[in-house]
Image (spheres, rainbow, N blue to C red):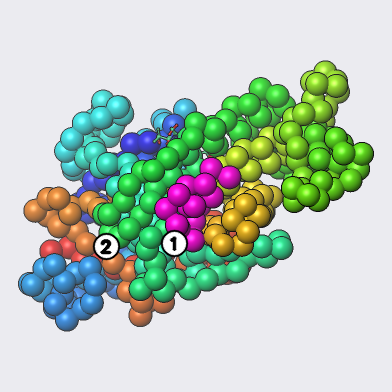
Amino acid sequence: METCSFGDEIEERESKISHLAIDIGGSLIKLVYFSRDDKCSTGDQWINSSNEGGDVSSSESTCPILEGKLHFAKFETSKINECVEFIRSKKLHHSGGGAYKYTDLFKEELGVALDKEDEMNCLVAGANFLLKTVRHEAFTYLDNKKEFEPIDQNDLYPYLLVNIGSGVSMIKVDGDGKFERVSGTNVGGGTYWGLGKLLTKCKSFDELLELSHHGNNRVIDMLVGDIYGGLDYTKIGLSATAIASSFGKAINKDLEEYRPEDISRSLLRLISNNIGQISFLNALRYGIKRIFFGGFFIRGHPYTMDTIAVGVHFWSKGEAKAMFLRHEGFLGALGAFVSYGKSRSDDIIVHCLVERSLVCTPCRGAAVDTVDGNMDESETIECCVYPS
Ligand SMILES: Nc1ncnc2c1ncn2[C@@H]1O[C@H](COP(=O)(O)OP(=O)(O)OP(=O)(O)O)[C@@H](O)[C@H]1O
Ligand SMILES: CC(C)(CO)[C@@H](O)C(=O)NCCC(=O)O
């Protein structure tokens, strides 16, 4: 993943768009951009930053508040030209500096240079930003129920951040900018999509995920009961329905004899279980009780979240808790967005005002239930940007 951001204002017909951050991952490109509300576009709203709490206090001088919305978009990395076209059509591009893998493409197509931000820094900054400022962001998933949990600012750290992208990073977070990448695994979202595509001939990730809804993993996975004559192995705490060996039954038939639905479900279970287990072991290593899972592998998918949550609960004997994030896939891009300018003289401080209620509002179509539903990319976060 590469995370980049660039700023300055671009006039659009309906709103002013400024500040774009882009996260170019192994599988997906994520964009986060800010559009100023019309009512604020005169730029005549000022606050004294020293009177406001939190992030803006680093500046003593007064500064204008730009009220507006954060927007989200994603594209497959293999179709980067669609992303470039989107940026061009929305006129999101402008100035910047720096260089990296896609620099030439962005320079040639859009005439912009990218400022590179550190990936881990951005993941942590994005997670902290969401956990500290966006209500209804973090939730548990137990017994097929999503429950939002308010985050106590005084009891946030340490936590383990597990970002499940193509690969998986596990980061112990101790504060703003205070973190250590303690582990990772190469068995991640890319593995599910890659192996799933080969085994099922699916054309898209969404198709593969959809198949998993209708599958039965017991057809392919070897269960404890398959080994123990249908019985639990009570002495070591394993029920008959626990998986003894993922894909363990696949030795019995040829690939064509298995349903793609069952293959997808077993694969999803295998990967989610494995990540849940490694995450728990790392939480245990540092005495951490709360694990936040992000990354686009999750996609708010009930079976994925259930497998991870149940695994963490089971292995930790209820001591550790798995939590999920509504903006799961945008941590890096959001982090690039909020970090932009921090190391430069043209400081841009992004801060969501609690008074603006931080609801996610739909920007097209009818009202959606923004709290219970999965995140829809057409939703936005109302926020304020404080440029110094
Ligand atoms: N539409 C999609 N197309 C492809 N993969 C998808 C899609 N939706 C979800 N995914 C899953 O999300 C994963 C990528 O997640 P994410 O965008 O968070 O990581 P990344 O930034 O691409 O990876 P990395 O950080 O390892 O470079 C894919 O490997 C796949 O499992
Ligand atoms: C290489 C990155 C950091 C790129 O985002 C990610 O894909 C990852 O964490 N992979 C796992 C690598 C490992 O720790 O084995």
Q: Which span of residues is magenta-colored?
A: 277-294
Which residue occupies 54% across, 36% down?
A: 188
Check disc 2 and give the amino acid type: Val
Alpha carbons under labels 1 and 2: distance apart: 15 Å
Which residue occupies 63% across, 59% down?
A: 317
Q: Secondary structure at mark 2?
A: strand
Residue 55 screen position, x and y as percent: 22, 68
Q: Secondary structure at mark 1?
A: strand
Q: Which mark is drawn over residue 350?
A: 2
Image quadrant occupied by the C terminus:
bottom left
Q: Quadrant of residue 88?
A: top left
Q: Residue furthest top?
A: 254
Q: Is residue 108 left or right of residue 236?
A: left
Image quadrant occupied by the N terminus:
top left
Q: Quadrant of residue 159?
A: bottom left
Label 1 crowd (10 A; few <14 / some 14-19 / many >=20): many
Q: Quadrant of residue 366?
A: bottom right
Residue 124 screen position, x and y as percent: 35, 52
The reply to whether the C-beta atoms of the residues labelled 1 and 2 are less than 8 Å apart is no
**Which residue in the protein does label 1 denote?**
380
Residue 147 screen position, x and y as percent: 60, 69
Which residue occupies 78% across, 34% down?
A: 221
Nearest-to-viewer mark from 1 and 2: 2
